[in-house]
Image: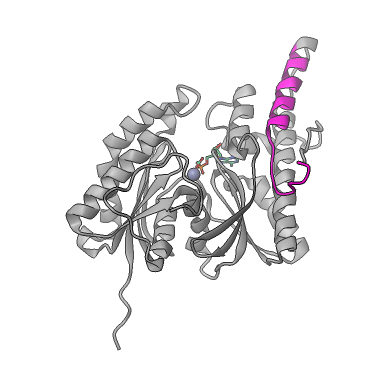
């Protein structure tokens, strides 16, 4: 009896400030996951500078791919297909990965599979949760996106809610900057919050009339800025830990309440989270507690698979490859690519 051939994806991710490559076997087994982060560079400017990101990707991408192949113990001749993020993201940054993927696929005569960045984040859940299969609800919370998604099947998504203004990660980053924590703010707010009282300051929890699954974080962000201003005017010292913890609590409540409501109303007993903010320790704890209470199974990737990486792109590319998705040499970077669009 012949064993079905393994599908090995060489995946590339360069949509923002990480140059990443990975080799993933059959969608769920990560043979290598190499990430070259530019964070230290962008920290100097308080955020990602697109032009610098593109240049750095060009400098690093060949080396990162070579390392990923080497670490996996394979050569290009073992690879089944090339997967690459082609949107959404910074156009110049995306272009580096897309051009590289096309060049390798063309030279090695391999199929090319373009992947949506958010599909990658969602698929990160498949890597460590071998039992997780669609359908399920997934809350995607990253620096650029806050989406509540029904994952109907592999590669089939229905967005039921999204943010009307800032993404959750963006709100974390802006508040972190306002209280002097620097970039990227999410992990720093997470850490400082552990020393603060989440009930110290009552920040607004926005509800959008007629859109129960939509989010809005600009109100809480403004409330934090107002609080800082009023403390300054009164000459009062700001308790940054209390401020961080109270801000974080308001964001988490909005995320958890909507995700749980969606799982219950749509009748799913599986809920996953994804994206950079999904590594937030309080969000994970609050979501776990709420899921336990409702009899919902809670899935989340390890932090290394939450923030941008190429293993998640390899997982997503595998399922797209199995469905027959193939892209041509005209594949382009699409900075505002919509989930589910081809
Ligand atoms: O998914 P990601 O790496 O990149 C995008 O696709 O945007 O997400 C980055 C975002 C940043 O806003 C960062 O501050 C946030 O994720 N983040 C966190 C934590 N770790 C990263 N936010 C809250 N708590 C964390 N522990
Ligand atoms: Zn991301």
Can you tell which quarter of the image residue 73 is in? bottom left
**Residue extending furthest toward the bottom:** 1
Q: Quadrant of the N terminus?
A: bottom left
In this rendering, is residue 272 above or below 7? above
In the picture, measured across the screen, residue 73 lies left or right of residue 251, that is left
- Label count reads 0
Q: Nearer the viewer, residue 208 or 35?
A: 208
**Residue at image coords 28%, 43%:** 99
What's the colour scheme?
Answer: one colour
Residue 39 versus residue 142 in the image, above or below: above
Q: In which quarter of the image is residue 3?
A: bottom left
Q: Quadrant of residue 277?
A: top right
> Toward the viewer: 203 or 280?
203
State left or right for residue 190 relative to residue 153. Answer: right
Residue 29 appearing in the image? no
What secondary structure characterizes most of the magenta part? helix
Percent across and percent down for residue 203 are 78, 32
Residue 320 location (% of width, % of height): 41, 62
Q: Residue at x 34, y 44 (%)?
A: 332
Please tell me whether residue 105 belongs to the stretch shown in magenta.
Answer: no
Residue 189 appears in the figure? yes
Residue 230: % across, % down: 78, 16
Q: Quick check: is 213 in the magenta stretch?
A: yes
Q: Which residue lies furthest to the left in this view?
A: 107
Magenta stretch, residue numbers: 208-232
Residue under the image location 29 percent in, 38 percent down: 60
Q: Look at 33% across and 68% down and name the residue there.
A: 7
Q: Judge from the rendering whether residue 326 lies leftward or rightward of residue 87; answer left or right.
A: left
Q: Residue 211 appears at what percent x and percent y?
A: 73, 46
């Amino acid at each position: 009896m012949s064993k079905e051939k393994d599908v090995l994806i060489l995946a590339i991710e360069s949509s923002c400030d990480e140059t990443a490559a990975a080799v993933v076997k059959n969608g769920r087994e990560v043979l290598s996951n190499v990430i070259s982060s530019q964070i230290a560079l962008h920290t100097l400017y308080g955020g990602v500078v697109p032009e610098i990101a593109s240049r750095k990707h060009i400098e690093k991408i060949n080396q990162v791919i070579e390392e990923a192949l080497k670490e996996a113990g394979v050569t290009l001749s073992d690879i089944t297909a090339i997967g690459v993020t082609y949107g959404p993201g910074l156009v110049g940054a995306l272009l580096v990965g897309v051009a590289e993927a096309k060049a390798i696929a063309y030279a090695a005569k391999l199929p090319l599979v373009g992947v949506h960045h958010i599909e990658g984040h969602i698929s990160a859940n498949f890597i460590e949760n071998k039992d997780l299969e669609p359908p399920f609800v997934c809350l995607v919370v990253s620096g650029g996106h806050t989406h509540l998604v029904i994952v109907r099947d592999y590669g089939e998504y229905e967005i039921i809610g999204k943010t009307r203004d800032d993404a959750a990660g963006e709100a974390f980053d802006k508040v972190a900057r306002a209280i002097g924590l620097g970039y990227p703010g999410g992990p720093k707010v997470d850490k400082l919050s552990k020393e603060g009282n989440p009930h110290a300051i009552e920040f607004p929890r926005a509800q959008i009339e007629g859109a129960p699954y939509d989010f809005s974080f600009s109100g809480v962000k403004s409330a934090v800025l107002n609080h800082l201003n009023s403390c300054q005017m009164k000459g009062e010292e700001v308790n940054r830990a209390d401020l961080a913890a109270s801000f974080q609590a308001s964001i988490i409540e909005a995320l958890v309440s909507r995700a749980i409501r969606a799982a219950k109303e749509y009748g799913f007993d599986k809920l996953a989270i994804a994206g950079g903010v999904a590594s937030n320790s309080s969000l994970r704890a609050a979501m776990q507690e709420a899921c336990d209470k409702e009899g919902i199974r809670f899935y989340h990737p390890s932090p290394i698979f939450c923030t941008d990486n190429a293993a998640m792109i390899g997982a997503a590319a595998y399922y797209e490859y199995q469905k027959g998705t193939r892209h041509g040499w005209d594949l382009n970077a699409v900075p505002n690519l919509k989930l589910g669009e081809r």
